[in-house]
Image (cartoon, rainbow, N blue to C red):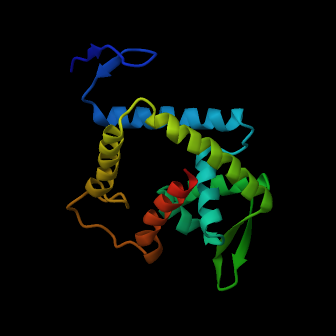
Amino acid sequence: MQNIRIPSTSKGAPMIKDDRLIFLVFSAQQRLRMYINSALTASGVRVTAAQAGILFLLKQKDGRTMTEMSQIIGIDNSTMTGLTDRLEKAGFLKRHADPGDRRASHIHITPPGLAEVDGAKAVIRRINEEIKTGFSSQEIEAFKRVLNGFFDKFQRNGAVKNQPSAPLSPSAAGGNDEGMAAEKKAE
């Protein structure tokens, strides 16, 4: 496939017409994550974008389980454990054993965690506005339709569309909408 260079309408490198949508989506996501993490660090925020997502969820509803949060965010339990371990070591959250289930623990945000999430929220809100800069409201709405279309085309639990999939647990079924609502509140 041949790429055609199109002059950029903004500062920087020329835009490339590229039909490799998966590559473009993943590259944009990676670049945005790196940009957010750099902006968080430059602003004195000590958490990463992924860690901030956990704190946003806990600020919205304290006492969630790691399984509940991993289903909402869409990461596996081992990744959630690592993120939670780092947040706990930094003093931003605490785990409390579930008296009814020894395998589960409830995660609670601490006062330093609340302060950290507020700092992250300000940075993420600013970057959200940066993303919109240079685009019309119609372009932003079209972009949001495309992004939301991913959720329709590619089921939230990772199953291939039109293929049998495992039923979602009640927390996962409503959880993704909760996560998007928590993210919206953070913006």
| 114 on left or right of 126 | right
Q: How many marks?
A: 0
Q: Is residue 17 above or below residue 60?
A: above
Camera sees residue 144: yes
Front residue of this view, candidates 135 and 83: 135
| 128 on left or right of 168 | right
| Residue found 67% across the figure and 57% down from its top | 84
**Residue 113, percent across and down?**
74, 57
Camera sees residue 86: no
| Residue found 45% across the figure and 38% down from its top | 29
**Residue 46, percent across and down?**
73, 43
| Residue most extreme to the front | 137
Placement of the N terminus among the 4 image quadrants: top left
**Residue 116, percent across and down?**
73, 51
| Residue most extreme to the bottom | 100
| Residue found 55% across the figure and 38% down from its top | 127
Corner quadrant of residue 42: top right
Front residue of this view, candidates 46 and 129: 129
Corner quadrant of residue 49: top right
Front residue of this view, candidates 144 and 31: 144
Corner quadrant of residue 9: top left
**Residue 163, percent across and down?**
22, 62
Front residue of this view, candidates 105 and 25: 25
